[in-house]
Image (cartoon, grey):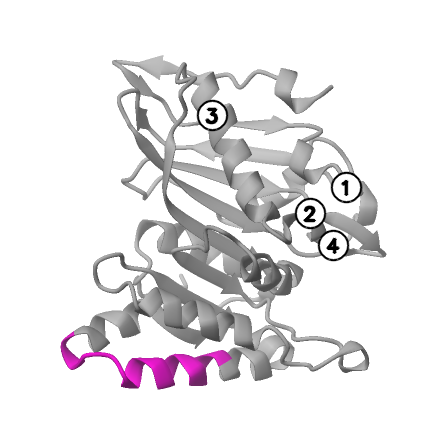
Amino acid sequence: MDSDNQQLVIALAGGNVLPGEAFLADTPVLRSHAGTQPDLFLRWNEVLLTAAAIDVAVHLHGFSQQGGEMPLSEKVRRSGLDLSGRKRPTLALLPRGNWIRHYYYDFPALLDGGIDRLVEYGVERFAAAIGMPGGLAIDRFMLSAHSGGGMPAVDAIAAAKRPPDELVIFDGLYGRDPRFGAPMQGLEVIERWVGERLAREPERAGALRLVYIERQTGPFSRAVSELIARHLQAAEPELAADLARRYRVELSGVPHGYIAEICAPQLLADPGAEIDWR
């Protein structure tokens, strides 16, 4: 069944859209991805029916021991797409990646502007479901990724027309296989994005939060920490402390598999939060 013909079940109360979630299958943007259906998970918090705009949070998942048979539901809890602490109206999207082999996934459909098309599609479907055929504007865009979704997230923003306001990567900057190119390829994408984001501070605040485990993603993560430090040195002193809360790299306080589940809800509520590892 084409996902355009599937209905989102929306609950209303007192003129508001109540928090909810849904799965969609055969998402047009993701049709080139190999794997199971459904291929797109949506979750939203309370939204006023009078709202003119909505924020969007996209999460790219990592590997699965289920390989190509992975159900997308496996990744929902571990994605950390928990909007209960978020005050702004927000639509969260969890796309199923493309199964390559063994337990590996990537996200080729999100390259070359594909991430923009996914965001627009999700918002269009949600707006239509709540009776706003004219659509909703997209305000803030947050992109997070865990594990094997980290490098695809970097690749996705390289040609995005709407780069994320907030980029969060959970132990996902493994770098490239040196047999196929420079191990640090992609660092220049992050460098450019950080420069563009900081140029919009403080009028439009952003964030770059990286959480890593040294033995897995240490070298690339520490290289990002160094480039953040260089940029913040050039920031106006009165802004530097606030920027350092929102642009930083830190070691994880939990094992790899739990990082997004623990951190993402806290960072969705406050991109400058001190992570409570408990």
Residue marked by disc 2: 109
Secondary structure character of the magenta stretch overall? helix
Gap in Å between the C-alphas at discs 2 and 4? 12 Å
Amino acid at the residue labelled 3: Phe
Residue marked by disc 4: 105
From the image, state whether disc 2 or disc 3 is nearer to you: 2
Where is residue 180, by image quadrant? Answer: bottom right
Residue marked by disc 3: 126
Where is residue 197, by image quadrant? Answer: bottom left
Amino acid at the residue labelled 2: Ala
- Is disc 3 in contact with disc 1, using a CB cutoff of under 8 Å? no
Amino acid at the residue labelled 4: Tyr
Q: Counting residues from the N terminus, which is met first, the one under dot 3 or under dot 1?
A: 1
Q: Assess disc 3: are there few (<14), some (14-19) or many (≥20) residues with their C-alpha within 10 Å of its C-alpha.
A: many
| Residue in view at x 32 percent, y 33 percent | 53
Q: Counting residues from the N terminus, which is met first, the one under dot 1 or under dot 4?
A: 1
Q: Which residues are magenta?
A: 224-238
Gap in Å between the C-alphas at discs 1 and 4? 13 Å
- Is disc 1 in contact with disc 2, using a CB cutoff of under 8 Å? yes
Decide which of 122, 74 is in the foreground and name it: 122
Amino acid at the residue labelled 1: Ser
Gap in Å between the C-alphas at discs 3 and 1? 23 Å
- Disc 1 is placed on an element classified as loop
Decide which of 30, 57 is in the foreground and name it: 30
Q: Is residue 117 above or below residue 195?
A: above
